[in-house]
Image (spheres, rainbow, N blue to C red):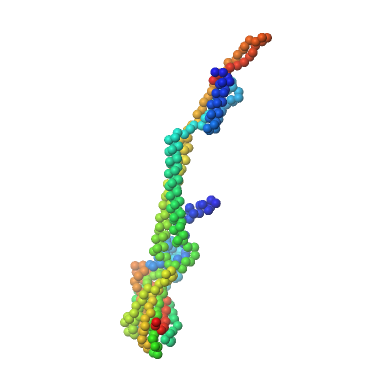
Amino acid sequence: MKCAWAIAAVLAASSTAVADTPATTVGNANVVTADHPITVTAPGERSSSNIQFLAGLAGAGLVVVGLGVFYNLDARESANAVSASGPTGQPWTDGDQADYDHTHGLAVRAGVCYGIGGAVLVGALVTWIVTAPRDQVTVIQPHVMPTVTPAPGGALLGGQWSF
Amino acid sequence: MRAVLLVPLVACSPTIAPGAYECGPNAECPPGLACSGSDFTCDDPVTVEPFSCTAGSNATLASATPIKMLGCVSETVSMPSCLGSGDTDGWFSFTTPANCTAVAVRANVTFPFAFEGIGVVLGDATGSPIGSDLDCTTEGASQATSCFEVTLADGSAYTLDVVPENGGNCDGDCSYNQFLLAVQLLTPQ
């Protein structure tokens, strides 16, 4: 494999990686010598099952949190019915107590949903971090072969690179 | 914007300020508050005062408090009083004018919901019951009311007996209450 083709191949591989996800080329790619290997790092890709699992986990968390919001808003509406910051002139009745208890129950449900939903979302985030695929690192060791070609009145000095 | 979003999600518990509500039957109050015996409102348990009663000396028929009403159609006479713990009667007496074409009595006894319910019984001169009250509490009222309106004979003596009705007395722990008795003579319709 000749230099031109080899470099083109490397660049082509790199550009393909860049097209999907940012690829990092570590090392000095501009100086291709035997002492300077080319390291190509491509971000790892998640499996579809991993993505589905994470999406399901996050979705479940969001649903439970949404349920908490529903209970929260319901509790807030109920709380407004009995809340009072100033004299109402009204006696505290069994109906008021029932509203109060109902509101308390809704608030507890909302809190439980927030707790569970939040924990599931945090779990999804942790799982996303823990199951992140490792970057794929490829080290290319170029082989340099100097060439000397006799020419009229001298010689032509060149080189061939292979990978 | 964030605050606007957070408020509806956080403020879901009732907030009730001390004094916002009157005590309900059986001295019931919102959680965390207690019924004050002095003004019958739900206040901070630390600041509530016990019920106090300066009962009249009219616990018997013989010591009934006289009500003076002039004319066949009279002004409303209001008398605040109370039934202390264990009191069973508060007697009042009045006499209808002799020269009325027709006369009736309208009596109301108004009392806080907080403690034991109170009624009023119309009796003849000897205290024998001839009429009893109804629940006349209006919707949304801050206090309960029992009342009646009964046609009477002119020139006759009658009694009013304010009695506990054994309801809302905290299973006996708040078997007392204050009341306002209002009496008026009028022409029956």
- Asked if residue B91 shows in the view, the reply is no
Judge from the rendering whether residue A10 lies leftward or rightward of residue B122; answer left or right. right
Q: Residue at x 34, y 78 (%)?
A: B132
Question: What percent of the width, then of the height, locates residue A60?
Answer: 43, 44
Residue B88 quadrant = bottom left
In this picture, is B63 found above or below B175? below
In this picture, is A110 found above or below B58? above
**Residue nearer the viewer, A94 or B175:** A94
Circle count: 0
In this picture, is A88 found above or below A136? below
Q: Quadrant of the C terminus of chain B?
A: bottom left
- Asked if residue B20 shows in the view, the reply is yes
Q: Residue at x 48, y 32 (%)?
A: A45
Q: Farthest residue in the left direction?
A: B128
**Residue nearer the viewer, B132 or A156:** A156
Q: Residue at x 44, y 84 (%)?
A: B74
Residue A75 quadrant = bottom left
Q: Farthest residue in the right direction?
A: A153
**Residue nearer the viewer, A4 or B69:** A4
Q: Farthest residue in the bottom direction?
A: B99
Question: What percent of the width, then of the height, locates residue A78?
Answer: 44, 58
Residue A18 quadrant = top right
Question: What percent of the width, then of the height, locates residue B123?
Answer: 34, 82
Question: What percent of the width, then of the height, locates residue A122?
Answer: 46, 43
Q: Residue at x 60, y 14 (%)?
A: A147
